[in-house]
Image (cartoon, grey):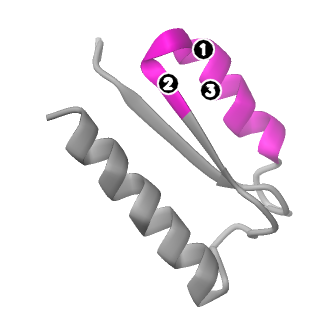
Amino acid sequence: AYTGPVLVAFGTSDPVVPPEVGRSYGELYGPRARLVPIEGAGHVFESAVWREELFRRSLEFLLAIQ
């Protein structure tokens, strides 16, 4: 029922949920989706660098949809 914008962030080295799943969600939501692959990150964004990128990109997304 949700019809708004969607952020799909995922680590490209996630051993739990493969990056293909994130890309599938991107296809499912179509132009409403913004895909944000975090290069090299795993399932829990293990390094501070990956978490900072995730938080920065999430904040950019939220500010853009206001």
Work out how far the residue at label 1 is from the one at label 2, CA to CA, in angstroms.
8 Å
From the image, which quarter does the N terminus lie in? top left
State the residue position of label 2.
33
Residue kind at label 2, given as amino acid type: Ala
Boundaries of the magenta span:
19-34
| Residue at 50% from the left image edge and 12% from the top image edge | 31
| Residue at 31% from the left image edge and 56% from the top image edge | 59
Residue 63 x, y percent position in the rendering: 22, 45
Q: Mark 3 vs mark 2: which is more N-terminal?
A: 3
Q: Are marks 3 and 1 in contact (CB under 8 Å)?
A: yes
State the residue position of label 1.
28
Q: Are marks 1 and 2 in contact (CB under 8 Å)?
A: yes
Q: Which mark is drawn over residue 25?
A: 3
Residue kind at label 3, given as amino acid type: Tyr
The secondary structure type at the circle numbered 3 is: helix
Residue positioned most to the bottom: 48
